[in-house]
Image (cartoon, rainbow, N blue to C red):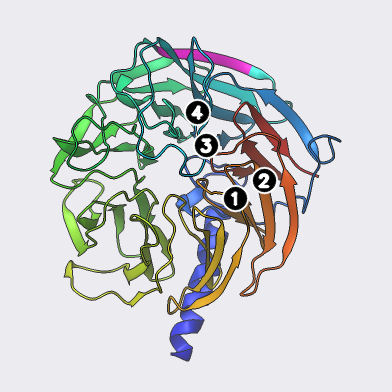
């Protein structure tokens, strides 16, 4: 047990270092950043800041419309998507909306914005689509939930049922793909359309797209340079809202994909199945994470436990390495940092687990509701609530609350970290926070 713990710790910190020096020392190229881990060390982020006074606020830029997508960063450019309608939209927080659907009968304008990361100046914006949405959404959702992705040459973004588009970093449109109507919702009710949320992932020249809906779900890979379809596989699964994770290990690279019935590891070049693990849960939203020699799986309605399977698994995995106590996150993706796993349940309960065993190390109430996923840097964890309060805690087994900062607007998007800056998207603005 002791030797395994040492291996876990060494590999975990090795992965943190690799993530920090991968695509670029300051790049955050996709949902949850390098290697989809939510971690970027060596950034010297501030412990606290003050929005009203402007303390440690480098810039604030207004972003029109409503979008729950996260910002991404490549070099000195920040990219973010939004959907602008002709009427005022009010965000529904917590469980107030039940399973209600929004009235999206007006025309929308789906846009990609490019900002200067140093000044917040909008360098360019492109309208990807305009018109009445092809599918509606949950009242807590938006028409721009999916985070874009970039490899430094191309920026790809899924604009819900309107489709997938690719641009170069100067804003020139390169290609587009019609993904069909993306209408996932309450399982078994074909009239329930809660909105698409899975984000694209780019790896080794391929763009991976997970399309889950009431019928004819699929997973596809397209060439990033041209949009050419490389492979496409059908998915006979309950629909989920999870973003796939690409893990590049010493022996193989795999695309790890959540499903309503099975979670799977696939060969990214062919879509062929490497392993599968039965997790029959509805409403999976969080993404799989990899730490050391484990794939950590979470998600499912209301407090589903986390489970871990070997990263080198093959065939059908019958028994997990460990199963955590009940109380897992519903929407946020957990954060594996060092030897611990951090997350807040949607109801504001901060939880810390052991990477090694899944053992519960800590629980405390932060307050508020949570949809955004936590991020970490230099021994601190940053958690943003729907009510707009960012809580900063130490990355310890018994976390200490260092600060709670009110951003004055709701937060649904997960923060990004790049070049000594924490980028936080609120309901109406994008903030750059740094010393």
User: Which marked residue is nearer to the observer: mark 4 or mark 1?
Assistant: 1
Relative to the observer, which residue lies in front, 86 or 103? Answer: 103
Relative to the observer, which residue lies in front, 94 or 204? Answer: 94
Between the residue at mark 3 and the residue at mark 1, the CA separation in whole angstroms equals 20 Å
Which residue is pictured at 65% across the width and 27% down the height?
429
| Mark 1 surroundings: few (<14), some (14-19) or many (≥20) residues within 10 A | some
Relative to the observer, which residue lies in front, 243 or 225? Answer: 243
Is residue 237 positioned above or below 199 on the image? below
Q: Which residues are magenta?
A: 123-129
Q: Which residue is mark 3?
A: 70
| Mark 4 surroundings: few (<14), some (14-19) or many (≥20) residues within 10 A | many
Q: Is residue 48 magenta?
A: no
Q: Position of residue 23 (x, y in %)?
A: 52, 45
Please, what secondary structure does the residue beneath circle 3 have? loop
Q: Position of residue 179 (x, y in %)?
A: 24, 26
Q: Earlier in the sequence, mark 2 or mark 1?
A: 1
Q: Which residue is mark 1?
A: 368
In this orientation, does residue 433 appear? Answer: yes
State if disc 4 and disc 3 touch (CB < 8 Å).
Answer: no
Q: Earlier in the sequence, mark 3 or mark 1?
A: 3
Please, what secondary structure does the residue beneath circle 4 have? loop
Please, what secondary structure does the residue beneath circle 2 have? strand
Q: Which residue is mark 2?
A: 389
User: Which marked residue is nearer to the observer: mark 3 or mark 1?
Assistant: 1
Q: Earlier in the sequence, mark 2 or mark 3?
A: 3
In this orientation, does residue 226 appear? Answer: no
Give the tally of numbered discs: 4
Q: Which residue is mark 4?
A: 67
Between the residue at mark 4 and the residue at mark 2, the CA separation in whole angstroms equals 18 Å
Residue 146 falls in image quadrant: top left
Give the left or right position of residue 197, taking residue 229 as reference.
right
Between the residue at mark 2 and the residue at mark 1, the CA separation in whole angstroms equals 8 Å
């Amino acid at each position: 047990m002791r030797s395994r713990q040492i291996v876990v710790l060494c590999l975990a910190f090795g992965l943190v270092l690799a993530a920090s020096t991968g695509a670029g020392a300051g790049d955050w190229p996709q949902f949850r950043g390098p290697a989809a881990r939510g971690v970027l060390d060596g950034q010297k982020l501030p412990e606290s800041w003050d929005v009203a006074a402007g303390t440690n606020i480098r810039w604030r830029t207004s972003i029109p419309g409503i979008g729950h997508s996260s910002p991404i960063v490549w070099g000195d450019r920040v990219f973010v998507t939004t959907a602008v309608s002709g009427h005022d939209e009010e965000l529904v927080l917590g469980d107030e909306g039940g399973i209600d659907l929004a009235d999206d009968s007006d025309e929308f304008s789906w846009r990609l914005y490019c900002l200067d990361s140093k000044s917040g100046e909008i360098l360019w914006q492109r309208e990807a689509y305009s018109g009445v949405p092809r599918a509606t959404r949950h009242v807590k959702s938006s028409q721009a939930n999916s985070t874009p992705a970039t490899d430094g040459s191309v920026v790809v973004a899924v604009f819900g049922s309107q489709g997938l588009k690719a641009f170069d970093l100067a804003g020139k449109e390169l290609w587009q793909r019609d993904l069909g109507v993306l209408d996932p919702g309450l399982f078994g009710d074909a009239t329930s359309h809660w909105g698409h949320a899975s984000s694209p992932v780019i790896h080794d020249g391929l763009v991976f797209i997970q399309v889950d809906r009431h019928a004819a779900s699929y997973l596809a890979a397209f060439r990033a340079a041209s949009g050419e379809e490389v492979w496409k596989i059908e998915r006979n699964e309950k629909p989920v809202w999870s973003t796939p994770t690409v893990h590049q290990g010493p022996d193989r690279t795999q695309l790890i994909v959540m499903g309503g019935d099975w979670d799977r590891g696939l060969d990214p070049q062919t879509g062929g199945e490497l392993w599968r693990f039965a997790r029959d849960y509805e409403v999976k939203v969080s993404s799989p994470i990899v730490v050391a020699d484990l794939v950590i799986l979470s998600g499912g309605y209301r407090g589903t436990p986390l489970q871990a399977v070997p990263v080198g698994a093959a065939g059908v995995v019958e028994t997990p390495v460990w199963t955590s106590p009940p109380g897992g996150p519903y929407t946020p993706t957990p954060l594996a940092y060092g030897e611990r796993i951090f997350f807040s349940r949607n109801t504001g309960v901060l939880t810390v687990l052991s990477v090694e065993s899944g053992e519960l190390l800590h629980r405390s109430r932060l307050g508020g509701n949570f949809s955004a996923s936590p991020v970490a840097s230099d021994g601190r964890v940053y958690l943003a609530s729907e009510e707009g309060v960012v809580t900063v805690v130490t990355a310890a087994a018994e976390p200490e609350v260092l600060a709670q900062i009110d951003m004055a607007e709701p937060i649904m998007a997960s923060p990004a970290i790049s070049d000594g800056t924490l980028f936080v998207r609120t309901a109406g603005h994008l903030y750059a926070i740094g010393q």
